[in-house]
Image (spheres, grey):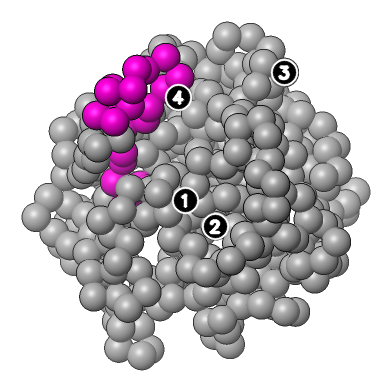
């Protein structure tokens, strides 16, 4: 990974008190504005960058409560586990993880408590939303509102009593068996979001199907004020599946670059690394393949990771420099290590150089999966788990 610099992102108030600033899971850039979300609340944050192309600082935080913008299916204080952000036209899109959660067993728990916690699985309704938020321009920058002055209204798929994206998969031959499995057990886990025109791409961290990652393609339309529905696609279905050969990795984020999608890929379960960025060529064109491999999917770069820390969760394409230089990518991290915590209320994101060419998706870039501090011997070859 060619790191060209770092950006200190500074937060305040409830974002710091909740620890959301060290659980960043989604990012998207818009000129000098940076939209972010973490997986501990149901809020979207906006920071101001000191430069649109080569930023070093992001601050002046504004926070927007999702419950004030749309009618969430769960309690307003319940987290939405926002895992993806997209910016398109006059809208900001956010998506929840659509996942079930198994209680975590910690190192200090005794044997009986470990068994009890691992037996508990919970469902939180606010995780099962895909929201389209109305953006208004103000003298102080863009803000998201419940209803804009021009009549546009924020809306969502997954309102109380309405069908959500996971419901659509109940009879899917590939994905239905994973709906009752928690996310960290290779169950359904949404972590990537990109919008191109009227099409929304939803990247799944899990399940990974015998080494193949899944991206869903949907077309939301207005159904009634505050609610969206999914329109039929060309084949008469309301979603389309794309299978990506990411060498056993799942999708951690999606980022548009023209008609291409940049795919941040990482392990589907509670593992550290490897983490890579791929270019899905022509993803947003009508000729895009449903099985994506070979020349359609090239490796851009490897992303650094730690053992139990520094998990890359979001990527954003920065503005092109005034000298015509290729734009850089901004990478934000969940569970940042001490070296990424300059103060108690700030974290460091990386700026990395974006390769214009890329290499074949699977070459001599392999490194084994790392579970905790030690890699399992013989656990993978070229990043692909050994069957």
On screen, residue 187 versus residue 70, left or right, reads right
Which residue is the site of mark 2? 250
- Of marks 3 and 4, the one in the foreground: 3
Alpha carbon distance from label 3 to label 4? 18 Å
Task: Indicate whether 241 appears above or below 157.
Answer: below
Between 251 and 357, the one lying in front of the other is 251
Q: Which labelled disc corresponds to residue 191?
A: 1
Q: Are marks 4 and 1 in contact (CB under 8 Å)?
A: no
Which residue is the site of mark 4? 20
Alpha carbon distance from label 1 to label 2? 9 Å
Q: Are marks 1 and 2 in contact (CB under 8 Å)?
A: yes
Q: Residue at x 36, y 39 (%)?
A: 81
Task: Indicate whether 239 appears above or below 287.
Answer: above
Q: Earlier in the sequence, mark 3 or mark 2?
A: 2
Q: Residue at x 45, y 33 (%)?
A: 38
Q: Earlier in the sequence, mark 1 or mark 3?
A: 1
Q: How many marks?
A: 4
Which residue is the site of mark 3? 339
Q: Earlier in the sequence, mark 4 or mark 1?
A: 4
Quick one: SS at disc 2? strand
Alpha carbon distance from label 3 to label 2? 26 Å
Q: Can residue 316 be seen?
A: no
Q: Earlier in the sequence, mark 4 or mark 2?
A: 4
């Amino acid at each position: 990974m060619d790191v060209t610099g770092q950006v200190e992102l500074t937060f305040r108030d409830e974002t710091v008190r909740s620890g959301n600033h060290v659980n960043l899971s989604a990012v998207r850039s818009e000129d000098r504005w940076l939209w972010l979300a973490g997986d501990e609340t149901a809020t979207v944050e906006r920071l101001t960058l000191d430069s649109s192309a080569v930023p070093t600082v992001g601050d002046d935080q504004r926070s927007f409560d999702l419950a004030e913008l749309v009618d969430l299916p769960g309690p307003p204080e319940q987290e939405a586990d926002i895992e993806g952000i997209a910016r398109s036209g006059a809208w900001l899109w956010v998506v929840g993880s659509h996942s079930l959660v198994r209680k975590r067993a910690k190192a200090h728990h005794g044997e009986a408590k470990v068994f009890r916690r691992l037996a508990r699985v919970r469902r939180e309704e606010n995780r099962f939303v895909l929201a389209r938020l109305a953006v208004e321009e103000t003298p102080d920058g863009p803000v998201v509102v419940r209803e804009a002055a021009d009549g546009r209204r924020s809306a969502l798929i997954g309102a109380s009593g309405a069908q959500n994206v996971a419901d659509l998969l109940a009879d899917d031959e590939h994905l239905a068996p994973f709906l009752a499995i928690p996310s960290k057990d290779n169950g359904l886990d949404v972590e990537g979001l990109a919008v191109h025109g009227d099409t929304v791409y939803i990247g799944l961290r899990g399940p990974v199907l015998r080494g193949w990652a899944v991206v869903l393609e949907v077309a939301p339309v207005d159904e009634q004020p505050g609610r969206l529905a999914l329109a039929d696609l060309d084949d008469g279905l309301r979603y389309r599946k794309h299978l990506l050969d990411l060498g056993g990795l799942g999708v951690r984020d999606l980022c548009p670059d023209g008609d291409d999608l940049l795919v941040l890929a990482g392990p589907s379960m509670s593992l550290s690394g490897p983490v890579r960025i791929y270019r899905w060529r022509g993803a947003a064109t009508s000729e895009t393949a449903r099985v994506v491999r070979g020349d359609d999917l090239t490796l851009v770069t490897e992303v650094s990771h730690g053992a139990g820390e520094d998990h890359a969760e979001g990527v954003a394409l920065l503005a092109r420099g005034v000298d015509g230089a290729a734009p850089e990518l901004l990478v934000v991290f969940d569970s940042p290590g001490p070296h990424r915590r300059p103060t108690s209320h700030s974290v460091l994101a990386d700026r990395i150089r974006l390769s214009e060419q890329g290499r074949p998706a699977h070459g001599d870039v392999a490194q084994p999966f790392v579970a905790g501090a030690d890699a399992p011997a013989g656990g993978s070859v070229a990043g692909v788990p050994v069957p």
